[in-house]
Image: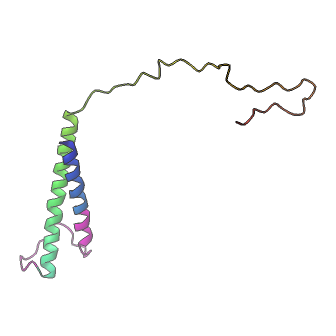
Amino acid sequence: MFTFLLIVQTLVAASLVAVILMQRSEGGGLGVGGSSAGLMTARGAADFLTRATSILGGLFIVLSILLAAVAGVSRESTKVDTTLAKEQPFKPTSQTPTVPAAPAGNEAEPAVPLAQ
């Protein structure tokens, strides 16, 4: 259910972005009334886009609230993975390479670990 609502939310969001980008920036924006002349006129198309923006915006808000409610109801308890806490610390074995100590008389060259 949550996945379905999330997909619908994504489609509504993409449609909302497309409808907003199709509008002309006249400064009018949402809420500007007008005559209900033909749908194919410039003003009719603007009214349609304004109406579509309002409907898609409302649907986006309703879906957001619904998704939050579904996520809150189906929330599972948090589980902490304790498998790493039970592991033993690393202990060197006989196969672990060691760096030989530098000779006592040669202090000019510090001991550097060997690259593997």
88 or 71, which lies in front?
88
Q: Is residue 38 above or below residue 68?
A: below
Q: Is residue 39 above or below residue 83?
A: below
Q: Residue at x 10, y 75 (%)?
A: 34
Q: Is residue 77 above or below residue 91?
A: below
Q: In which quarter of the view is residue 107 placed?
A: top right
Give x and y (percent) for residue 99: 77, 27
Magenta span: 16-39
Quarter that holds the N terminus: top left
111 or 92, which lies in front?
92
Find the residue positioned furthest to the bottom: 41
Q: Residue at x 19, y 58 (%)?
A: 57
Q: Say whether residue 30 is magenta.
A: yes
Give x and y (percent) for residue 102: 85, 26
Find the residue positioned furthest to the right: 105
In this rendering, position of residue 87 left or right of residue 52: right
Give x and y (percent) for residue 79: 34, 25
Q: Residue at x 22, y 35 (%)?
A: 72
How many marks on residues?
0
Q: Main secondary structure of the magenta part?
A: loop
Give x and y (percent) for residue 24: 25, 75
